[in-house]
Amino acid sequence: MQSPVDRLPLELVDEILKRLPIAAHDQLDHPRGTGDTSVHHAVLASCARVSRLFHVSAVRVLWRDQHLGWICRAIFRDFIRRNVSRSDRLEARLAAVGLDDDSEEEGNDTAHGAYSTFPDAQYGYLPRPISAEEWARFEHYAPHVHVLRYTRDETIDSSFFLLLQQYARRQPLFPNLHELIWEHATPELVSVVSPSIRIIRLPEDEENEEYAAEAQVNVFHMRRHVFKALLPTVLKGVPSLEVLKTRTLGRETFWSPLRAPSGECLLSQSIRVLHISESFTTLTRVALVIISSLQRLVELSIKCSGRGPKHNLGMGAALDLSDVRPFNRLERLRIKGFGIEVTALIEAIVAPVLEDVGIGVYTEHHQNQTRAGLALGVALDTLRRRNADTLWRLHLDVRSWPVPFFPTTTEPTFAPIARPLLDLRHLRYVSIFNGGRADVSVPALVAAWPDLRTLIMPAQEPSPDMLTAIAHTCTKLESLSFDSLAKEFLDLPPVAAENPAASTDSDVAIPALRELRLIERLFTRDSPDAKHENITRFLRSLFPRLVVEQKLVGADPVPYTDMSLAWYYEDNL
């Protein structure tokens, strides 16, 4: 006779088990997405033992999103992890004269000659062939893996991938894989690719962790080169790919195999989202032409890598980009580079239905600031001419720009190079990273863009007077985001408790602001809770619809790793 549990609909069991890890994290007071992941696994493993019905569903949820190292340790009994101890320069000199301390007996290998501030890295391997029992276990669980992560904090020796391939016999190791996150520049990527993949993420090594051990530099370069050389073949073998986010390939020869002799792109035509980082030369000579053949592309992000232009574009210099096709479905565009590079790319990318554009501009001391400023003005004017009627989201990162860009409290007009933005009258969402010039006038921006509903300014610290002016003049704004509140808020005089009956004059527009997001909270050890309550009352007196969800004042500073930063990094350049 079936138990009541076994009579539950399978879809309901699936939904319950998907939510269990989140509930377990909330009970442990971890922010979602952080903390000890073993809690998730322990909860689901316990559910798998309840009944056959729960076992099937729990296994599906438990194995859906996995790290490659976790899979190895769960299935292969003798899989070994060892530490690579990255010694400092003194230890390297001792090693050179034979005075190094070999710690093999403790499971550590010393990579002498390295100089790094990163924590010890780990690598794993299997010291024997895979048994038939282990392979059967792998075949049972591998089809449940939809998201596979191979992160930089753990390295698996190439011999292990060879062992897997001996059993796989040219069949995909993970036949139902949907998303692959591969943080290593290693050719073993080929081993786990499956035609079922929809998303590939190959993130850049921003911290140079792979490069940290000097004694391994040559090996690293060889393996990275093979990885890049094999990548075009890998990508051509994933026909259903929809999202591709890749690291810098670095040379035109890595892009050329992706272009057929007829000029067509050999990448999957199902790609909708593409994020790349390339040199400007590679982009304009090869990559951009290939990318423009992706007719279903709706999101494109380009970061110009390298130390800046190694050519002299000038103003109006001839760049032959006639082979670049229009991006007829492109809705979201992000470009980051030097002013001249950004201008050339925006000129080349014709996107008639573009809705969301982000531009990040950086400069170097040797660059001609006047010429770069003129170039950026041309780029913004191009957007005005082509997309004034379609653009409703704007992200602008000009933190390194040497001159004022937007209206300030002392200069209430747009800078000449920014004046084309005045014609983008349909903007509803604007994000401005204005560097150290934190006195941008919010009322002036709202006057320029009357449909504005969301404004993000991560370098600004509004004062009580500024927010008072915003409440009186920007009544349609619904969301504001800043770095933090100004320190003047700590000295606010006591604010009376809210009076719902106050301000009933129907002729006075009630501010629509519902959300105020801050990267950092104010820091004081002088009655922080009381100051938080006083500031909250002040804000609600200005914005009656505001919901204050985060702590505004604390006795300890909040580091930049706090989860409250997620909104900024998700939405901006």
Image (tube, rainbow, N blue to C red):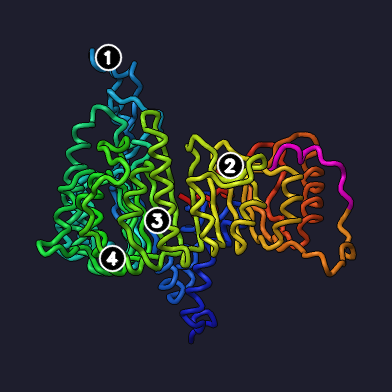
Label 2 sits on a secondary structure element that is loop
Give the residue number, with chain letter if any, for mark 2.
Answer: 459
Label 3 sits on a secondary structure element that is helix
Q: Residue 153's x, y, as percent? A: 37, 42
Q: Mark 4 packing: few (<14 Cα in 10 Å), some, or many (20+)?
A: many
Q: Mark 1 packing: few (<14 Cα in 10 Å), some, or many (20+)?
A: few
In the image, which residues are magenta? 485-496
Labels 2, 1: front one? 2
**Viewer-closest of 449 and 176:** 449
Give the residue number, with chain letter if any, for mark 1.
Answer: 99
The CA span between labels 3 and 4 is: 32 Å
The CA span between labels 4 and 2 is: 37 Å
Instruction: Give the residue type that dot 1 points to.
Output: Leu
Instruction: Give the residue type that dot 3 points to.
Output: Thr
Q: Who comes first in sequence, dot 3 or dot 4?
A: 4
Q: Who comes first in sequence, dot 3 or dot 1?
A: 1
